[in-house]
Image (tube, helix red, strand yellow):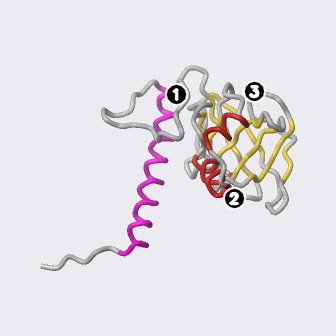
């Protein structure tokens, strides 16, 4: 009996759906551990490019009201040594080594923050700014500060991106309701 072979597009769409689902589970797992100490199920693992921060002291960030809809999310703290997926994609497109570039731009101390859709925010030691990037890695908003956490104000819209600037709120992980 002949079994039809799925098209490349169908396989790619299924893979994207599965990755998105796993990212949501990872984000939920990070918040659950930080808030309640729940371990992940046996055999489960986090996405390797977005290692979750230790539960103690972990924070979550809410971004809302920004003109770039994809950044209006809840973000979970990530290990400073892990490279954001969108950052890696941008580096690959530019022909830059993603890990070396990340080590040069991040300070290796402050966590960066990731949303379930792979939008992310990080502090860039090269320019002294916090960046909010859309899922594909393109910058959307910046704020000039050396604060340890993303600032609540001072955000500017980057050229080609939509205003208004978002409101940013940093909270202990697990305190957010998820409402945007």
Please report whichever mark, 1 or 2, sits nearer to the chain's N-terminal start: 1
Q: Which residue is mark 3?
A: 148
Check if residue 11 falls in the magenta segment.
Answer: yes
Residue contact between numbered discs 2 and 3, judged by CB atoms under 8 Å: no
Residue 69's tag is 2
Q: Quadrant of the N terminus?
A: bottom left
Secondary structure, mark 1, is helix
Q: Look at discs 2 and 3 and give the one toward the viewer.
A: 3
Q: Position of residue 55 (x, y in %)?
A: 53, 24
Please tell me whether residue 108 is drawn above or below residue 91 in the rendered image.
Answer: above
Q: Which residue is mark 1?
A: 35
The residue drawn where x is 62% and y is 31% is 80
Q: Residue furthest left?
A: 1
Residue in the foreground of this view, choosing between 21 and 10 = 10
The residue drawn where x is 65% and y is 31% is 111
Please report whichever mark, 1 or 3, sits nearer to the chain's N-terminal start: 1
Q: What residue span does the magenta drawing correspond to?
A: 7-36
Residue 124 is drawn in which quadrant?
top right
Residue in the foreground of this view, choosing between 22 and 35 = 22
Q: Position of residue 103 (x, y in %)?
A: 67, 34
Query: Distance of mark 1 from mark 3, alpha carbons?
Result: 21 Å
Query: Distance of mark 2 from mark 3, alpha carbons?
Result: 25 Å
């Amino acid at each position: 009996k002949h079994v039809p072979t799925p098209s490349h597009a169908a396989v790619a769409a299924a893979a994207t759906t599965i990755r998105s689902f796993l990212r949501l589970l990872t984000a939920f797992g990070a918040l659950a551990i930080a808030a309640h100490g729940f371990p992940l199920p046996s055999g489960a693992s986090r996405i390797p490019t977005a290692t979750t921060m230790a539960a103690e002291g972990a924070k979550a960030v809410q971004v809302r009201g920004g003109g770039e809809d994809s950044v209006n999310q809840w973000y979970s703290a990530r290990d400073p040594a892990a490279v954001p997926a969108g950052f890696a994609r941008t580096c690959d497109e530019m022909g830059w080594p993603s890990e070396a570039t990340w080590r040069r731009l991040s300070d290796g101390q402050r966590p960066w923050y990731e949303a379930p859709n792979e939008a992310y925010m990080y502090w860039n030691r090269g320019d002294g700014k916090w960046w909010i990037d859309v899922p594909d890695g393109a910058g959307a908003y910046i704020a000039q500060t050396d604060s340890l956490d993303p600032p609540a104000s001072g955000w500017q819209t980057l050229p080609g991106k939509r205003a208004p600037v978002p409101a940013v709120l940093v909270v202990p992980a697990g305190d957010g309701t998820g409402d945007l």
